[in-house]
Image (cartoon, rainbow, N blue to C red):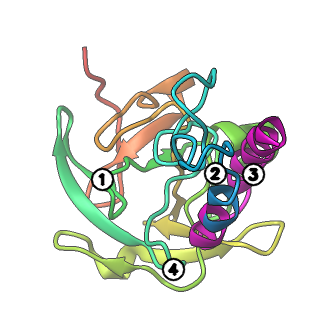
Amino acid sequence: MALECTAMARKLRIRKSLVAIAGLGLTLSILGACGDGDGDDGGGPYGTSDDEGATSPENSPETSPDAGGDGMAELQVHSSDVGDILTDADGMVLYLFTQDSDGTSTCYDECAENWPPMIVEETPEVGEGIDESLLGITERDDGSQQVTYNDHPLYYWQGDESAGDMNGQGVNSVWYVLDPDGEAVEETTG
């Protein structure tokens, strides 16, 4: 039973990278029922610390960060080593892809696995320093709604595990963080 639950948890984490995490509470309830049978919760829905590769959803590189929990995202401005940049409500850094144009995403399949799009169900709320007139939504091929800023579709980087991580900055000279004006910040940290 524990092995089945672990396998199910891994499949669900991978699947969550393809959709918004609006159903996270339901997923946790389902996985929470998969205890190890000894009366405790088995270290949580993602197994014990003995499980190789077990991670929480917040730290999983396979999981697009949850920007609002209910389909609502909040864009914010945070200070970084390269200046003020855009993040989501949880402080996860957002990126633009220079190969996108006219507010349309060209990042699908393997690209979208590595660079999960910022998906919402409604127009996101904005924090201080965000120019609401630059905010938009573009429809992806699967019908989901991706946030745009200054006509740039926004993405996360699967290699960012914590708020403030900028491990995707400058990757292949086409992925960059954005400043509050919606422009690419091409400076990198050393």
Q: Residues within 10 Å of mark 1 (few under 14, many from 20)?
A: some
**Which disc, if any, is residue 70?**
4
Cα–Cα gap, marks 4 and 3: 18 Å
**Which disc, if any, is residue 12?**
3
Identity of the residue furthest to the bottom in this view: 122
Amino acid identity at mark 3: Leu
Please name the residue shown 71% across and 47% down the image.
Answer: 107
Q: Which residues are magenta?
A: 1-28
Judged by its main secondary structure, the magenta piece is helix
Front-most of residues 139 and 56: 56
Q: Which residue is mark 1?
A: 91
Question: Where in the figure is residue 183, as x and y percent of width and height?
Answer: 35, 52
Cα–Cα gap, marks 1 and 3: 24 Å
Q: Between label 3 and label 2, give the one nearer the viewer.
A: 3
Q: Which residue is mark 2?
A: 100
Q: Secondary structure at mark 4?
A: loop
Is residue 25 a member of the stretch shown in magenta? yes
Q: Where 135 sits versus 153, above or below? A: below
Q: Secondary structure at mark 2?
A: loop
Return the disc, 1 or 2, that comes first in the chain's sequence.
1
Return the disc, 2 or 4, that comes first in the chain's sequence.
4
Cα–Cα gap, marks 2 and 4: 27 Å
Q: Residues within 10 Å of mark 3 (few under 14, many from 20)?
A: some
